[in-house]
Image: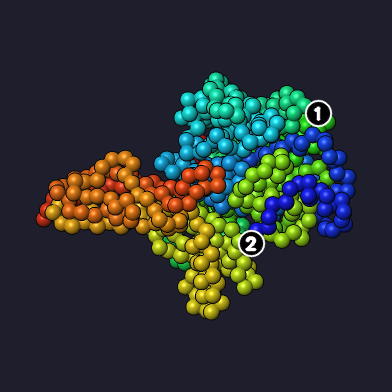
Amino acid sequence: MKPKTVPLVAVLLALMLAPEASSLRLGRHQRPSGQPKYNIILILTDDQRWDTVDMTLDGQDVMPALREELLEKGVDFTNAFVSTPLCCPDRASLLSGGYYAHNTGVLTNEGPNGGFEKFQDDDALSVRLRQAGYRTGLVGKYMNRYALSHAYVPPGWSYFAGIGGMRSWFDYNVVVGKGSVDGPGRGTVEPSEEYLTDHLRERAVDFIETSGTAPFFLYFSPVAPHEPATPAPGDETLFPEFSYEGRGSGEEDLSDKPAWASYLASGYDPAQNAAFVREQLRSLRAIDRAIVSLVDAVRQRGALDRTVFIYTSDNGYLWGEHRLSGKAFAYEESIRVPLIVRMPGLLPRQESKAVVTNVDIGATINDLAGLNRVSDGTSLLPLLADSSTAWRTEFLIQNHGGLRWSGVRAEVGGRTWKYIEHATGERELYDLSTDPFEMTSRHRDPSQIVRDAMKALKLKLAGMRGLNIISRSAPGGQAGTAYAFPIATWGGRAPFSWSVTAGVLPIGLTLDPATGLISGTPEGPATERVRIRVEDSSVSPHSGHPQAFEQDYVVAIRQSGQEPSSHSPDAIVDMSGDQL
């Protein structure tokens, strides 16, 4: 059970009354009441593994400035995770103020269930912060599909410099403009040929320098180390000999894992993977230099004593574990991210092993800014104040896109387990206490301790996961013969409502709006493309709307007496990459 969010004032009061209560605490010298609100700088990288922030190769740190300015002066959350390990859903979770993907409605990177068009931005974090007196700035990547926005500037941003089209790291557009608390704005499109991370750094520094006396919130969102992860000039030859061989890399026997894992692993190229890993690490150096510039800009303003830095990533990335490369997987390397908080008054170089998630970041920003707002997360401020604070031991993980799965990572019987259910009907179960690299799924293990854990985890998952259509393809039919296709789902709250939102069903077939059953007797041969939508009966705490999911189908009806064509199972889709 997660603790109740505690207001910042209460945290500071408790600390002043009991300054020696913990080893991970705010210092005794607190800002007197009435001083300006905290400035907040959120640095969100793209596809960065958690273990890269403190990595040393060939005798040199991969990110030396991050170590010096953030790790050595803040708190390193070494058990930080994302619920949906994919770019757009995670960004929506942050910018909404800390909600799961099924509550933001942004489930994937692309339509019909994702992309920036699905995000309800009129009540986003930027709007709430602006209403609270903050100057708000976004510099970098906004959300996937934003390039199709026609220079749209979301509400709430005092300054917006979002990447509106990227052809390469030296050829891209930036949409520059501002929105208001009452609605969006329209920006201007500015092309640039400067190295991308450097260009974004300059804009971010300028935002800090021109923010005046108002507290500011800066969302600095560079693209690195997202593929193709082009290094900055001068960084191209760093770490020339490095080849990752850690954790479960190169695992040969995948018989305990879903069929798609073996399918994707069959195309794994160790040399290509090693080359890309080096490029990712090289591209991080420009972000590292940006950290120096951001901290220096705050220092020049004399504002370090009232500025909070939060460093994290939208998801992790597999570097060949199980012979897989990419994200959107349920494995640790995909869901685990860096999370470092530097905050005035914190004792330096602290480490927290508490299990925290991406939705907690939005909740923490709400708390820092004094926003009275409910979210799916829990503010980290009580935990920063006292490392003994009771904290969650379980959280939901899910992916609604090409690889559809949902799972729960939780403590059961004194051990940490991960249980995953796939849309294909396959299962995985890992005892992370004894198998942290997830080498052996124990979902078929008959031992009582495993059966008990699996039963408990199934129940937990059933009550947590979001609504999803898990039927990926429709069966074929024959003219003049009764047809029935019950569309399978999981998650959500009954009763459900079904509808056709695009296309038409073959003549003679109908969709039952209460059950999701497509049935009837087709009158003649036809091949129709149709989009089916399901809504549940819940009310999202963010959008105020029910959960919803849409799925495209091809419904093929053959001529009476014609032999059916061979039916292939649902397509295996590699979601390791995505478009900006």
Question: What is the x, y in percent for residue 332?
Answer: 58, 57
Task: Please tell me whether mark 1 sits on a helix, a strand or a loop.
Answer: loop
Say above or below: 457 vs 181: below
Q: Residue at x 60, y 64 (%)?
A: 410
Say above or below: 459 vs 156: below
Judging depth in this view, the residue of 282 and 180 nearest the camera is: 180
Q: How many marks?
A: 2
Q: Quadrant of residue 39?
A: top right
Residue 308: in sight, yes or no? yes
Say above or below: 184 vs 400: above
Disc with the residue nearer the chain's start (2 vs 1): 2
- Distance of mark 2 from mark 1, alpha carbons? 42 Å
Q: Residue at x 81, y 28 (%)?
A: 300
318 with respect to 557 (left or right): right
Residue 272: in sight, yes or no? no
Residue position marked by numbered label 1 in the rendering: 301
Q: Which mark is residue 1?
A: 2
Q: Residue at x 36, y 57 (%)?
A: 488
Question: What is the x, y in percent for residue 142?
Answer: 56, 34
Q: Quadrant of residue 434?
A: bottom right
105 with respect to 306 (left or right): left
Q: Residue at x 78, y 41 (%)?
A: 69
- Label 1 is placed on what type of residue? Arg
Question: What is the x, y in percent for residue 336?
Answer: 61, 53
